[in-house]
Amino acid sequence: MQLSYHGHSVVKIQTNGKTILIDPFITGNSLTDLIAEDEKPDAILLTHAHNDHVGDTVELAKKKNAKVVAPVELANYLGSQGVDAVGMNIGGSFDFEFGTVKYTKAFHSSSYTTVGGDIIYGGMPTGILFKAEGKTVYHAGDTGLFGDMEIIGKRNDIDVAFVPIGDFFTMGPEDAAYAVDLLKPKTVVPIHYDTFPPIKQDPEKFKSMVKSADVKILKPGELIEL
């Protein structure tokens, strides 16, 4: 399995000959190394409905008939836009041909703003546990710190966790470091920082506070092999 980070909360997983994109905010993402027109995902996983996470989902999914997995209300909306969308909810899991997806809770908000300015309710915000090739990847989505991260860590042997550190909208470095202590992943990658002025952060500060996991600060395009 190969995991790569592409700015903001964009994560690419390549496993079993399949390519999965999580929260593919590419167009308008000043930090990403990706070009939307060049991406050909087999599946797209979404944590919640905010535009900086849904991003290029509709265009990417239509181009390769990629399956989109999302919280059910968001999936219903994407389905109305002609996307092959599967709606799931917190606590549910399913074995797809590309891997197993399970949704966890996250503490945030979730709505999508259309081009016309309409606000679409996106259901509950979530984190994602993804399992394939005997490995477990946790993408926390946008969230504040919450105690049940300890349960997520105890119930899952997490190989790599992607956690937000940007503060303002999500956990900041201090809370994110505490979250790592609860989750107990082998490796942690900081995400959701530096994209916009309110979430500018020094990831080295986060790294200095984490004692229970190997911290990998990835530049957009850099990867981890599992």
Image: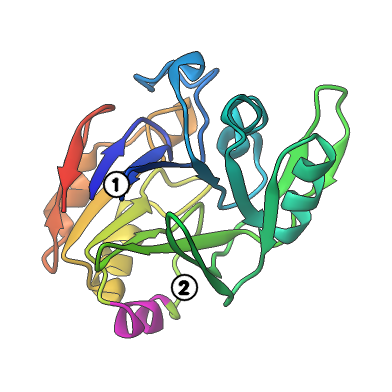
Nearer-the-camera pick, 7 or 176: 7
Whether residue 216 is visible: yes
The nearer-to-camera label among 2 and 1 is 1
Residue 217 at least partly seen: no
In this rendering, the count of numbered labels is 2
Residue 147's place in the image compared with 119, above or below, is: below
Q: Position of residue 209 (x, y in %)?
A: 16, 58
- Which residue shows up at 20% across the image and 37% down it? 223
Residue where numbered disc 1 is placed: 190
Crowdedness of circle 1 by 10 Å Cα count: few (<14), some, many (20+)? many
Q: Which mark is residue 146?
A: 2
Say which quadrant the C terminus sits in: bottom left
**Relative to 217, is 162 on the left or the right?**
right
Q: Which stretch appears magenta?
A: 149-156
Q: Nearer the viewer, residue 114 or 107?
A: 114
**Residue 155 belongs to magenta span:** yes
Is residue 147 within the magenta segment?
Answer: no
| Local secondary structure at mark 2 | loop
**Quadrant location of residue 199?**
top left
Give the SS element for disc 1.
strand
Position of 99 compared to 177: left or right? right
Q: Residue at x 39, y 78 (%)?
A: 152
Dominant SS of magenta comes to helix
Q: What residue appears at the point 52 percent right and 30 percent down from the top-left corner?
A: 25
